[in-house]
Image (cartoon, grey):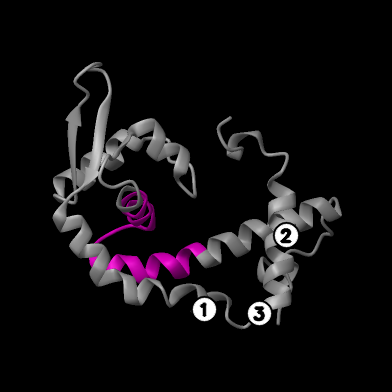
């Protein structure tokens, strides 16, 4: 198995162990994201759109505001409004303005969105094992611990207080 320096054809040493760790993490994240995206694109969705539909399925029946959806996303999406507009165009979500504050838009998953997720569930539920099943339980537990520890100082991903 090639190490990162070989994979990216780099001859010079990394400037620090932290740089090597960060670049390994980014490379791995990209690899896993592409593997996940290959599973969602057969249904005409990006992995980000799939994430939004899953969030909205979990928020039934009330739905969520744009800001609440953004806060729950696995990866930050800078233009959540446009993302939601695409899902609305596909008839996978429904939106309506708040009765008390017309500036607030509530988003709910539609019946078509729920049906799509039901069709996707069996395939998507196998993806984590396909991508990470070669790791032992102890390795997965340690990876989770280390990733959570690494995120501890990332202000952008802290849970709302």
In the image, residue 114 lies in the stretch drawn in magenta? no
Tell me the quarter of the picture where residue 37 sits: bottom left
Horizontally, residue 114 falls left or right of residue 1, namely left
Tell me the quarter of the picture where residue 7 sits: bottom right
- Asked whether residue 24 is in view, the answer is no
Few, some or many C-alpha atoms within 10 Å of disc 1 (few <14, some 14-19, many ≥20)? few
Q: Residue 135: give its label.
A: 3
User: What span is in magenta?
Assistant: 33-55
- Asked whether residue 122 is in view, the answer is yes
Horizontally, residue 62 falls left or right of residue 145, namely left
Q: Where does residue 10 sit, x and y in percent of width and height? A: 74, 63
Q: Is residue 70 above or below residue 25?
A: above
Q: Is residue 51 above or below residue 1?
A: above
Q: Quadrant for the C terminus, please.
A: top right
Q: Is residue 118 above or below residue 88?
A: below
In the image, residue 37 lies in the stretch drawn in magenta? yes
Q: Which residue is mark 2?
A: 145
Q: Which residue is mark 1?
A: 129
Task: Identify which residue, 136 or 20, lies in the foreground.
Answer: 136
Few, some or many C-alpha atoms within 10 Å of disc 2 (few <14, some 14-19, many ≥20)? few
Residue at the (35%, 55%) spot, across then down:
54
């Amino acid at each position: 198995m090639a190490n990162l320096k070989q994979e990216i054809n780099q001859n010079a040493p990394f400037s620090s162990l932290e740089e090597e760790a960060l670049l390994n993490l980014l490379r791995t994240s990209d690899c896993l994201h592409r593997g996940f995206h290959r599973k969602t694109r057969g249904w005409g969705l990006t992995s980000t759109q799939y994430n939004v539909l899953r969030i909205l399925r979990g928020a039934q029946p009330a739905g969520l505001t744009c800001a609440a959806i953004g806060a729950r996303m696995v990866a930050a999406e800078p233009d959540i409004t446009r993302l939601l507009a695409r899902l609305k165009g596909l008839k996978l979500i429904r939106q309506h303005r708040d009765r008390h504050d017309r500036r607030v838009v509530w988003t709910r998953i539609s019946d078509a969105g729920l049906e799509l997720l039901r069709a996707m569930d069996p395939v998507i539920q196998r993806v984590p094992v396909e991508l990470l099943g070669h790791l032992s339980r102890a390795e997965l537990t340690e990876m989770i611990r280390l990733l959570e520890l690494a995120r501890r100082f990332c202000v952008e991903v802290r849970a709302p207080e």
